[in-house]
Image (spheres, helix red, strand yellow):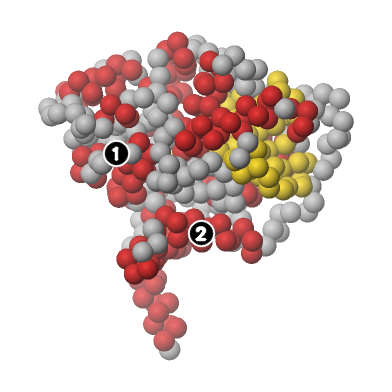
Amino acid sequence: MISTIIFTAFVATYIVPVRVPGPMNHPIKYKIVTGAFAFLYDFSRFLESTIGIPHYILLNTIVDSCDRIKIRTFDRGQVLYHDQYIDNVLVRIYTPTNVSKAALSPVIIFFHGGGFFFGSIYSHDTMNYHMSMYTNAKVISVNYRLTPNVYHPVPTEDSIKVVRYVIDNYREFSIDPKQVFLCGDSAGGNIAVVVERKLRREQKPLIRGVLLLYPLLQLVNFRSPSYLRYLPYQILSVLREDILTQVTNFYVNALFTENELFNNQHLSSKDYNKFYSKLNLQISGEHQIIGESHPDTWKLFDHNISPLLADDDILHNTPPTFIGACTYDVLLSDSQLYFQRLQKLNVKDIIYKEYRIFHGAMTFLDFPVAFNEAFDIVYDSAQFIINRTTFII
């Protein structure tokens, strides 16, 4: 009787209110997953208020612990994996079993999403296993340090340390330094773009390709068309104003309020003009802003924080890029704008695909919460890599 009451209360509180943002194959599954996330977030906030452990630490602990107990039904021995440290950064390395040890194989270096404060090599384990299996490439997943224990640029610095070491010591990993791919989802996509550009400036071997899966590409404008359309749905109970404000403040060590960011009150008219001039777009009359710039706004325009806003000469030399955008995502406009900028600059070998699924899809590949569209993203990403690689004996 009590369990029935508790279950009914949970459904009424967390499942029923969930709004599905649009047509999708499994709306009920989406509602259950979103409700479960909302419950976990509220529970972690409750524990924070009672025992003093920050909610983000509790959330990461819960997710990471699942790696030890999850049933790996997909693992049939096609890929071996192990954890190790590279230049003091924890990584998980996936190696296909059917690749000759004498061969120099392509490598995918992956940076997980989670708003820079959440996620790990464990949260994206299933995705990386499948990427390695589908491509016959090694995958190195990077466990960069998370905010707010560190701030920008530490997550990027941890990531680039790993990439540099792997390229400089490629024989240690049996990888081909001319066939290095960088991949990231959400905040990890931001890191992938920034790392590639830093390596380019250092004149390292050119990155063979970059894969950006629903990437976070700017932290300046929080009233883009996709923000206005999908923010009210609070996708996965994660893409909501309080958490997105936390993402920004944690990453750049700032003190923005929700009201400032989501009404663009952190921007002056000059800031707004600067944002659109970087994109070579015109501002329509209804978007005019009258106000003062927030003391921390200047940080957000740094192209290592908002890589969408980099100068044309930086974007012009972008390597082959796969952009996998999600329809139900406040970040959709960023992916579209990035693709449009690269197109206008006549950058070659840029692929843009949009999938009718929600932000965070790469963490939904495990039964019973798997979504077919998530596998579509993995498969298309793998094909992008396969079409641009060869094996060297």
Lower sequence index among marks 1 and 2: 2
Q: Is residue 361 left or right of residue 21?
A: right
Q: Residue at x 29, y 16 (%)?
A: 277
Most extreme residue toward the left, as rendered? 290
Residue 39: image quadrant is bottom left
Label 1 and label 2: CA atoms lie apart by 25 Å
Q: Is residue 295 left or right of residue 153?
A: left
Most extreme residue toward the bottom, as rendered? 1
Name the residue that disc number 1 marks: 254
Q: Closest to the observer: 63 or 328?
A: 63
SS for callout 1: loop
**Quadrant holding the N terminus:** bottom left
Is the residue 195 above or below the residue 317 in the image?
below
Q: Residue at x 59, y 51 (%)?
A: 122
Q: Which mark, residue 323?
A: none
Expressed as whole percent of the image width and height from the top left, the position of residue 279 reads 35, 19
Q: Is residue 266 left or right of residue 125?
A: left
Residue 169: image quadrant is top right
Q: Residue at x 64, y 50 (%)?
A: 126
**Label 2 CA crowd tier, 10 Å (few <14, some 14–19, many 20+):** few
Q: Count all numbered tags in the image, as a single digit.
A: 2
Most extreme residue toward the front, as rendered? 88
Name the residue that disc number 2 marks: 61
Is the residue 81 above or below the residue 178 in the image?
below
SS for callout 2: helix
